Amino acid sequence: MHQWESAWERVISGIPRGSVIGPILFLIYINDLDLGVDNERLKSADDTKLYGVVTNRDEALSMQKDLNVLTQWTSL
């Protein structure tokens, strides 16, 4: 084995990196992440960003509502 090679390890759970089904299962898992979110969002790989212009109280409340929706999703 070369110094840049990793040793084989027995995997007893999860999905190994580099699998074809791993990304598909991840997309299914996060598919409903932004249901009920009104502000703009960007999804990239395993990152989601919520953004918007907040210039008044209503916009701030809208952003907070979206943050609450996303927080609730993480606790399901």
Image (tube, helix red, strand yellow):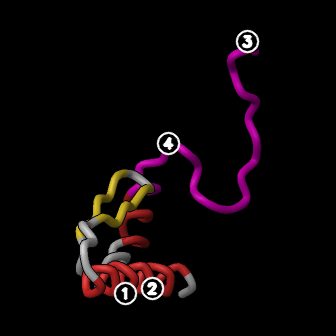
Extreme-top residue of the structure: 2
- State the separation of the CA atoms marked 2 and 3: 49 Å
At numbered mark 3, what does the secondary structure look like: helix, strand or loop?
Answer: loop
At numbered mark 1, what does the secondary structure look like: helix, strand or loop?
Answer: helix
Amino acid type at mark 1: Lys
Instruction: Specify whether 42 is left or right of 4.
Output: left
Image quadrant in which the N terminus is located: top right
Question: Which residue is depicted at the point 58% across and 49% down?
Answer: 16
Which residue is label 2 attached to?
68
Residue 39, percent from left and from top: 24, 74
- State the separation of the CA atoms marked 3 and 4: 21 Å
In terms of depth relative to the viewer, which is nearer, 64 or 4? 64
Extreme-front residue of the structure: 56
Numbered circle sitting on residue 2: 3
Which residue is label 4 attached to?
18
Q: Is residue 18 magenta?
A: yes
Q: Earlier in the sequence, mark 2 or mark 3?
A: 3
At numbered mark 2, what does the secondary structure look like: helix, strand or loop?
Answer: helix
Crowd band around label 3 with a 10 angstrom C-alpha radius: few (<14), some (14–19), many (20+) = few
Numbered circle sitting on residue 65: 1
Question: Which residue is depicted at the point 62% across and 61% down?
Answer: 14
Amino acid type at mark 4: Gly
Image quadrant in which the C terminus is located: bottom right
- State the separation of the CA atoms marked 2 and 1: 5 Å
Mark 2 vs 3: CB contact within 8 A? no
Number of the front mark, 1 or 3: 1
Q: Earlier in the sequence, mark 2 or mark 4?
A: 4
